């Protein structure tokens, strides 16, 4: 990848669809965009399967080895941000690029606030009626201290389970305009080195150090375990890598891009296959029992083994992407959901919260057809949300 800034030879800008977090594309062709929309749609379906309280939630989790759909979702969002906003900066200037970033960030924040209010009102009311521990545990801190829970959640300090992904996304979007502006003017080298150092710091407990210092200075009333499961300083590496790749593709025509060597593509494919076999042999953890080595694949810290597995997937898709695009069939429902990913993601949160509040955790006593019906209804509802969002987008245009 060329780490030096290039301001010339930018392709025409790509506009993001209204209601979609980003419309991904690994090149400028519509076919590649639709296939990556399908990939994002697949990620949304897999996240829904993982989060719903069904008997097949665990078996379908981490279907790609020791990585989950969340890693791909974050990376693709960052990729498109780099692609779209680099082109916007070239066409309209840095100030316009920053304004567009912030406008998008406000929309994502609005979705987060809506989901929080839904949790604290509708789900809280259902919890009183059905008394499902699964729902109670989601908002235990809020139930103990409603006022503190409300204002700290709006400031993205208190982040209930399942509602801790969008705050991380918002944080990255807030910082990205300055990061991208710096990289376009001076290159990505310092940004990437800084990102790797932050990731390493997260592995050593950087977030806890900052939290403890904040509590000492301010008396912050939110427990550390209520600030969100994702280590923001670790996952930012995926965001920076994705944004750097998207920016590179926006500045360099397809024929001039640095190709991955064949040996690297084949090695990455071998790694991917090995990790898939390993995951379905041992389960969600690479080693049985409470083996301390399982920490090297920890999801929340984006631990080294997980990061290595994900980067192998990126290499495979970059190397074999053209072949896959030419030979894989188009799955249009996934494309539709992927093209409206922000609203579909928010809808999936609402559906999962409702399922946890009404049905509770999965139990052997519950008929399997109920879980299958719950999952089918969820996917259909997400598809309907995407179709409505895309229809409204076309109506506005």
Image (tube, rainbow, N blue to C red):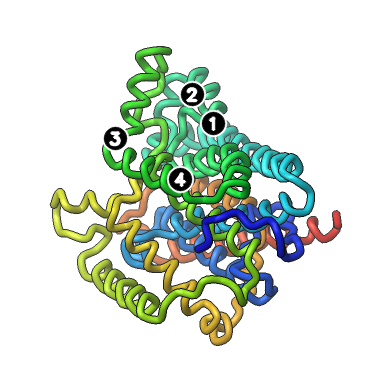
- Dividing the picture into quadrants, the one containing residue 273 is bottom left
Residue 229 is situated, as x and y percent measured from the top left of the image, at 38, 40
How far apart are the two marked residues, 4 and 1, measured between alpha carbons?
29 Å
- Please state the total of marks drawn on the protein image: 4
Crowding at label 3, few (<14), some or many (≥20) Cα neighbours within 10 Å? few
- Select label 3 or label 1 by which is in front: 3
Circle nearer the N terminus (4, 2): 2
In the rendered image, which residue does mark 2 sit on? 149
Q: Are marks 1 and 2 in contact (CB under 8 Å)?
A: yes
| Residue at left offset 31%, top offset 77% | 270
Please say if 129 is above or below 279.
Answer: above
Which residue is nearer to you in this view: 90 or 158?
A: 90
Q: Secondary structure at mark 4?
A: helix
Q: Is residue 33 visible?
A: no
In the rendered image, which residue does mark 1 sit on? 120
In the rendered image, which residue does mark 4 sit on? 236
How far apart are the two marked residues, 1 and 2, measured between alpha carbons?
9 Å
- Select label 1 or label 2 by which is in front: 2
Image position of 277 (left or right of 61): left
Crowding at label 2, few (<14), some or many (≥20) Cα neighbours within 10 Å? many
- Dividing the picture into quadrants, the one containing residue 169 is top right
How far apart are the two marked residues, 3 and 1, measured between alpha carbons?
31 Å
How far apart are the two marked residues, 4 and 2, measured between alpha carbons?
25 Å
């Amino acid at each position: 990848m060329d780490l030096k800034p290039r301001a010339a030879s930018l392709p025409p800008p790509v506009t993001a669809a209204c209601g979609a977090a980003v419309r991904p594309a690994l090149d400028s062709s519509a076919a590649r965009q639709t296939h990556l929309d399908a990939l994002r749609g697949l990620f949304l379906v897999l996240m829904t399967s993982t989060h719903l309280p069904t008997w097949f939630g665990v078996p379908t989790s981490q279907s790609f080895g020791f990585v989950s759909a969340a890693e791909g979702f974050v990376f693709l969002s960052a990729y498109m941000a780099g692609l779209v906003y680099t082109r916007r900066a070239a066409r309209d200037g840095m100030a316009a690029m920053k304004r567009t970033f912030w406008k998008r960030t406000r929309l994502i924040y609005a979705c987060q606030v809506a989901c929080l209010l839904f949790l604290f009102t509708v789900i809280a009311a259902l919890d009183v009626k059905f008394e499902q521990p699964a729902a109670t545990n989601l908002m235990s801190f809020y139930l103990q201290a409603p006022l503190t829970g409300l204002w700290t959640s709006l400031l993205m300090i208190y982040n209930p389970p399942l509602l801790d992904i969008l705050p991380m996304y918002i944080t990255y979007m807030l910082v990205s305009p300055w990061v991208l502006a710096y990289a376009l003017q001076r290159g990505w080298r310092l940004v990437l080195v800084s990102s790797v150092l932050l990731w390493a710091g997260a592995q050593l407990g950087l977030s806890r150090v900052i939290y403890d210092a904040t509590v000492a200075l301010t008396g912050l009333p939110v427990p550390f375990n209520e600030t969100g499961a994702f280590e923001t300083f670790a996952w930012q590496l995926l965001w920076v890598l994705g944004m750097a790749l998207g920016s590179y593709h926006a500045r360099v025509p397809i024929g001039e891009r640095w190709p991955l060597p064949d040996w690297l593509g084949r090695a990455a494919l071998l790694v991917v296959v090995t990790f898939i076999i390993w995951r379905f042999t041992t389960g969600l953890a690479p080693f049985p029992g409470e083996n301390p080595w399982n920490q090297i694949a920890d999801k929340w810290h984006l631990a080294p083994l997980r990061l290595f597995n994900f980067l192998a997937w990126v290499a495979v898709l970059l190397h074999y992407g053209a072949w896959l695009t030419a030979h894989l069939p188009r799955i249009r429902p996934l494309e539709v959901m992927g093209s409206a990913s922000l609203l579909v993601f928010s809808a999936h949160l609402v559906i999962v919260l409702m399922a946890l509040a009404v049905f509770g955790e999965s139990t052997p006593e519950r008929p399997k057809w109920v879980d299958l019906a719950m999952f089918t209804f969820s996917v259909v509802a997400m598809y309907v949300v995407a179709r409505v969002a895309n229809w409204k987008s076309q109506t506005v245009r």
